[in-house]
Amino acid sequence: MSNKAVIVTGAGRGIGLAIAKSLASRGYDLALVDIAEDTVREAAASIKGDGKYVPIAGNVADWDSVQTMVNEASEALGPIYGVVNNAGITRDGLVLRMKPEAWQQVLDVNLTGTFYFTKAVSPLMMRQKIGRIVNIASVIGLAGNAGQANYAASKAGVIAMTKSVAKELGGRAITCNAIAPGFIATDMTHDLPEQVKADMLKSIPLKRLGSAEDVAAAVAFLLSEDAAYITGQTIVVDGGMVT
Ligand code: NAP
């Protein structure tokens, strides 16, 4: 495949935008997906490079929206080589107090959204007999965290789905892997109480928060030829925090 095209969800800011910028610098064409139209248009315009960077607004948790977005991406970019399922949300709270809606919203975006994109791109990748699916999970999906039962369950689900999809699609040279970031400095973590941040920092052997670029580098590796024989795996990018 020349001009490899990759869809990145949640690409309007944070880790998703860093992934998009990193992939653009490596020569990929991109469909940037995000829920807010203005945000994703600005994100696509901010990317420097010689490729095509197409903004697509839609909701990863809505099946009709996902099918429309994948069609738009294919029409604009041609064959889809990869998808990076990065869009994610938190709605934290102890189980005792967690509203059922907060449970459901997080499962809908983080887990079902990843399933919808995987389902929508699978037939395209199977026809091409090549493809890469990279799912952004979290160390919380491996270790759990008080106040994040919904988020932990969604990310553990993503890790388990990754292994299953790897087994289903491996016969067509499609790989499916996950990345489990630790504590990464983005808007999602910016608003945590200072004490929580300080405690987390103490538990990181590499003594710094991760950057969105640290995660983007692992994504670029999994999309590269060097990772052709890796599938069903979860790469932990956490400065040694959990492992
Ligand atoms: P972020 O800054 O909140 O960015 C997430 C992006 O996803 C936002 O642009 C958001 O749009 C978009 N999004 C949310 N719901 C969506 C939906 N239904 N459809 C389409 N787009 C949607 O988050 P981040 O910190 O970059 O995290 C990115 C991924 O990494 C997530 O899956 C997260 O769980 C994972 N992760 C993050 C950390 C960390 O420390 N930051 C650690 C481990 C894993 P709006 O802003 O308009 O809602």
Image (spheres, grey):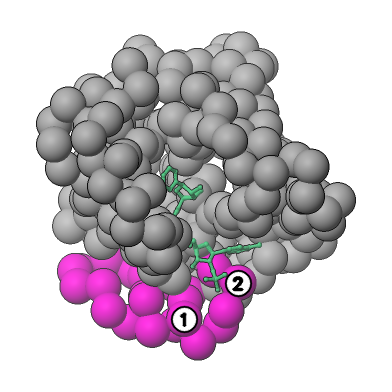
Label count reads 2
Extreme right residue here?
100
Q: Position of residue 240 (x, y in %)?
A: 24, 24
Q: Tell me the kind of residue under disc 1.
A: Thr
> Is the residue 93 above or below the residue 73 in the image?
above
- Pick whichever, 43 or 215, lies toward us: 215
Q: Position of residue 94 (x, y in %)?
A: 69, 44
Q: Can residue 164 be seen here?
A: yes
> Is the residue 30 above or below the residue 44 in the image?
above
Q: Position of residue 164 (x, y in %)?
A: 65, 17
Question: Does mark 1 have its CB less than 8 Å from ligand 1?
Answer: yes
Q: Residues within 10 Å of mark 2 (few under 14, many from 20)?
A: some
Extreme front residue here?
195
Q: Can residue 20 be seen here?
A: no
Q: Tell me the kind of residue under disc 2.
A: Ile
Q: Quarter of the image holding residue 155?
A: top right
Q: Residue at x 17, y 26 (%)?
A: 205
Report helix, strand or loop for mark 2.
loop
Q: Position of residue 52 (x, y in %)?
A: 34, 69
- Residue 35's disc is 2
Labels 2 and 1 touching (C-beta < 8 A): yes
Q: CA distance from mark 2 to mark 1?
A: 8 Å
Question: Does mark 2 have its CB less than 8 Å from ligand 1?
Answer: yes
Residue 64 is one of the magenta-drawn residues: no
- Residue 39's disc is 1
The residues colored magenta run: 34-55
